[in-house]
């Protein structure tokens, strides 16, 4: 707690719990490696770690909602993320909650003001009040649960209701009938555009073949067929 110069943290394999305020106030912490053995992240464990950019669940390769996230997820033993666990993690941009998590507590990701993309697993059952409050830059949410997770009136306080929420195709009606989920633009997950679809929709583009690889030229930028920018 309060180690102001700490920048990276790798917790040991076999750890079962990240305890109350264990790493709170480490304002320069940028990277967290949470082993797959962890079953619970307790209240305020990483509270006010304002510089967090990367959260690794289980130590696997990066994955995300759009394929460009620096947040990583695996089939971990994590079941609960406690109240205010990642409060004020300002720098986090993309978040993939690992499969197996059932409960995300009050204010767990409150004030993650740069969070742009969020993916919730099929296992999630409830997200607490103010859980994603002030995440005002969120532009896409993916919820893999067929049964709409319980959310509160202020779970997504100050998040634009015009953004798309992609859910399992067979669950669209259930989300549209839910008291709070229905406030969002609910869409079937099969309608979620791929990265390359996003490129095609933005502006005129041209395909070229270089060294056996198809590349997309758009304005002064070059992308692979999967949407990854080539420098």
Image (cartoon, helix red, strand yellow):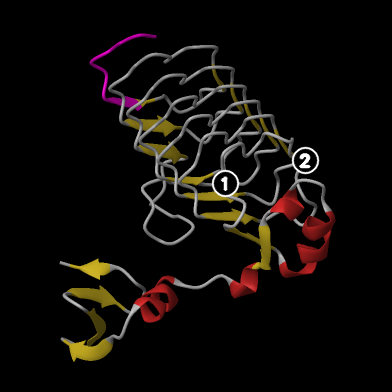
Find the magenta span and give its range: 1-9
Q: Residue at x 26, y 89 (%)?
A: 206
Query: Residue 117 in the image: x percent, y percent?
Result: 48, 51
Q: Which residue is drawn at 27% across and 13% down?
A: 4
Query: Residue 111 in the image: x percent, y percent?
Result: 48, 30
**In the displayed structure, would residue 137 be above or below residue 169?**
above
**In the displayed structure, would residue 1 be above or below residue 208?**
above
Residue 169 quadrant: bottom right
Look at the image and tell me in which quarter the C terminus lies: bottom left
The crowd level at tag 2 (other Cα within 10 Å; few <14, some 14-19, many 20+) is some
Q: Residue at x 47, y 19 (%)?
A: 47
Give left or right: position of 148 versus 53: right
**In the displayed structure, would residue 221 be above or below residue 215?**
above
Query: Residue 210 in the image: x percent, y percent?
Result: 16, 87
Give yes or no for residue 73 being in the magenta stretch.
Answer: no
Q: Is the magenta stretch mostly helix, strand or loop?
A: loop
> The residue tagged with tag 1: helix, strand or loop?
loop
Q: How far apart are marks 2 and 1 (CA)?
A: 22 Å
Give left or right: position of 165 versus 71: right
The crowd level at tag 1 (other Cα within 10 Å; few <14, some 14-19, many 20+) is few
> The residue tagged with tag 2: helix, strand or loop?
loop
**In the displayed structure, would residue 211 be above or below residue 159?**
below
Give the mark nearest the N terminus, 2 or 1: 1
Which label belongs to residue 75? 1
Return the residue at label 2: 150
């Amino acid at each position: 707690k309060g180690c102001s110069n700490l920048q990276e943290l790798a917790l040991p394999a076999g750890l079962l719990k990240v305890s109350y305020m264990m790493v709170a106030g480490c304002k320069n912490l940028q990277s967290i490696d949470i082993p797959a053995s962890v079953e619970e992240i307790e209240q305020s464990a990483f509270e006010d770690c304002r510089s967090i950019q990367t959260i690794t669940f289980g130590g696997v390769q990066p994955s995300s909602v759009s394929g460009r996230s620096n947040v990583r997820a695996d089939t971990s033993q994590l079941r609960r993320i406690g109240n205010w666990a990642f409060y004020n993690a300002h720098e986090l941009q993309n978040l993939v909650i690992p499969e197996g998590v059932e409960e995300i507590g009050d204010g767990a990701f409150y004030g993650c003001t740069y969070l742009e993309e969020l993916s919730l697993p099929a296992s999630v059952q409830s997200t607490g009040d103010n859980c994603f409050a002030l995440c005002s830059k969120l532009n896409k949410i993916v919820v893999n649960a067929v049964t709409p997770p319980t959310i509160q009136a202020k779970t997504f306080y100050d998040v634009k209701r015009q953004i798309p929420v992609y859910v399992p195709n067979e669950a669209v009606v259930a989300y549209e009938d839910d008291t709070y989920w229905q406030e969002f633009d609910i869409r079937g997950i099969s309608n979620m555009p791929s990265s390359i679809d996003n490129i095609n929709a933005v502006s005129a583009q041209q395909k070229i073949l270089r060294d056996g690889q198809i590349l997309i030229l758009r304005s002064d930028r070059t992308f692979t067929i999967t949407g990854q920018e080539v420098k």
